[in-house]
Image (cartoon, coloured by chain):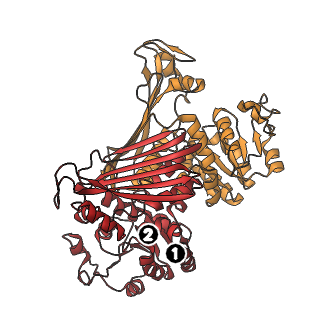
Chain colours: A red, B orange
Amino acid sequence: MLAVGLGPIGRAAAEVALGKASIELVGAVEADPAKQGRDLAELLGLRERSGIVVEGDLDAAIESLSPQAALLCTSSFLPEVQHDVRRLARAGVHVVSPCEEMLVPDFQHPQLAADLDLAARRGGATVVGTGVNPGFVLDFLPIVLSGACRSVRRIRGCRVVDAASRREPLQRKVGAGLTEVEFTARLRGGRMGHQGMRESVALLDRALGLGLDSITQTVEPVLAERRIVTDYFTVEPGQVAGVKNIGLGRRGGETVVELELRMFVGAPRPRDEVEIEGEPPLRLVIEGGVAGDVATAAILVNTVPRAAEARPGLLTILDLAPSRRIG
Amino acid sequence: MLAVGLGPIGRAAAEVALGKASIELVGAVEADPAKQGRDLAELLGLRERSGIVVEGDLDAAIESLSPQAALLCTSSFLPEVQHDVRRLARAGVHVVSPCEEMLVPDFQHPQLAADLDLAARRGGATVVGTGVNPGFVLDFLPIVLSGACRSVRRIRGCRVVDAASRREPLQRKVGAGLTEVEFTARLRGGRMGHQGMRESVALLDRALGLGLDSITQTVEPVLAERRIVTDYFTVEPGQVAGVKNIGLGRRGGETVVELELRMFVGAPRPRDEVEIEGEPPLRLVIEGGVAGDVATAAILVNTVPRAAEARPGLLTILDLAPSRRIG
């Protein structure tokens, strides 16, 4: 397997892969010149050398290493990963990616998704996006739960994350320490906060045939009510502590799907909740929530064999046998 | 689709199937002569006639109706369903069954499973066992959860069912109202209590590559501490209220899997719980639990399209894309 992209998620996934007997990590590719030429283990903070030298040229790595699969952890946006996907798919390399838009690639990019699907099928490669959020907590879990339901009227999901327990870039991403004005300005610039909320709603729509006629989201700042000190920030009362991101799926004026992500420093009672109004009604709670980065890294690696055994094409996780912990 | 076997689960599943736009129920087969020749709707207690007359001859029904799939709800034991499976598979009819032993068919019957797998592949049919328990709560849910784990050291599952809320045959099956001596005598006669506990442990073993060297179970009576009156039984203090069934998976003397089913009249706080000791640790709770019969009927019907799109053979639910509520 090839690790492509060595940001926080790519590094975490590479480390998980290194510990797996059933997966051989054969190489690592990263665009940042500062990381190239170094032993992967050094970047991961591991003591023992891995023998894998980080490269800069994906095509050369594919050519020399002939990997069967790749973890592609370079961007949240499908247009930004498309060229690497094409390179890998052309060579018949299966791709698993936490690219949020790839969860339901044709939701925002139908033409690009069709092109990539064709490229994947031509190359005999399976390409699929997954992760914890999107990809598991607010979409895959309710979909799996619905398997025990005769009817589903409404789906609610809620994920509460105390950003203070997470890495610094994530605290920065949710806007911790900003003023409300700064937050709103950054939000307008795009790319603020969580990506993939609408893809979660879209995956539910597709899986359950909900026939939604609108999929929208709101992103709002959550303001601190008291001073909060994290390892990286001090947030004063009235400053931004983080975000509240709500994804809505509506059909005929009725809200059928409501997914909520609250991610802010000091968030009380971190948890994941899924509720299905239906027959039977079901309500699932994971106290503490599914830990972010380690779980995302695990899901990526655990999905590799499931992608490899699936048919070629740009698929969704609904097309794969369910990922489980691999050895 | 063909409904084969019209006991409580078969009837519930047939009723679910009748309500689905994406499935056409074309016939029903039942061995009990008292049910044959009647309109299916009558047996289901529905007002409107279904136009489906219950038949007795499976081969004739396959021949005349050419179903694409069948729900086979006739027995908990693989040897008892094998002939019908062969008949259906030979004709290329996909089979979904709540037969508990079929969840992991080669666990108790490796030779028979190999024979049925061959028959299914020759006929181009997919044959798979599923349900709520086994098939969902204590096995599939922890397997799906493990997808978010980098490592898994230990799995615990606990399902608590208040049998008083369930149908009379189930209350009878768990031994409600028996003396401890009667319970033990019936237990020795086999076929008492819950079937499929060891199959749940075996499915976890297989899915996660746990390398268990022993899979065992215990079945004990739970004695009533107070008088309990249900719609069907009165259980006096000291009489049997139901069963406690524990499935254990061990490796090198260590308990790696522990699944517990408590099913008795008056059981407090019905719920389903799954706990994974691993990285990250995960604990999931469904208060109230996944309702038994309606959820089993739903899972069976929801699995039909997933079986139909899978490769031919005697498979397990691990080989299928995850079932979700179908329309």
- Apparent side of residue B248 relative to residue B79 in the rendered image (left or right): left
Subunit ID for the residue under disc 1: A
User: What's the residue type where badge 1 is placed?
Assistant: Ala
Q: Is residue A270 above or below residue A197?
A: above
* Along the viewing direction, whichever of B74 and A177 lies nearer the viewer: A177
> Which residue is denoted by mark 1 in the rendering?
A125
Marker disc for residue A96: 2
Q: Crowdedness of circle 1 by 10 Å Cα count: few (<14), some, many (20+)?
A: many
- Which residue is located at x 38 percent, y 84 percent? A58
User: What's the residue type where badge 2 is placed?
Assistant: Val
Would you identify the image quadrant in which residue A196 lies? bottom left
Q: Position of residue A67 (x, y in %)?
A: 42, 78
| Element under disc 2 | strand
* Along the viewing direction, whichever of A26 and A88 lies nearer the viewer: A88
Would you identify the image quadrant in which residue A151 lies? top right
As measured in the structure, the alpha-carbon distance from the residue carrying label 1 to the one carrying label 2 is: 11 Å
- Which residue is located at x 35 percent, y 65 percent? A21
- Apparent side of residue B9 relative to residue A163 in the rendered image (left or right): right
Q: Crowdedness of circle 2 by 10 Å Cα count: few (<14), some, many (20+)?
A: many
| Element under disc 1 | loop
Marker disc for residue A268: none
Q: Is residue B198 visible?
A: yes
Q: Is residue B231 above or below residue A227?
A: above
Q: Position of residue B304 (x, y in %)?
A: 64, 51
Kindly indicate whether the residue at mark 2 contacts the one at mark 1 (C-beta within 8 angstroms): no
Label total for image:
2
Q: Is residue A326 above or below residue B301?
A: below
Subunit ID for the residue under disc 2: A
- Of the numbered discs 1 and 2, the one sitting upstream in the chain is 2
Q: Is residue A141 above or below residue B49?
A: below
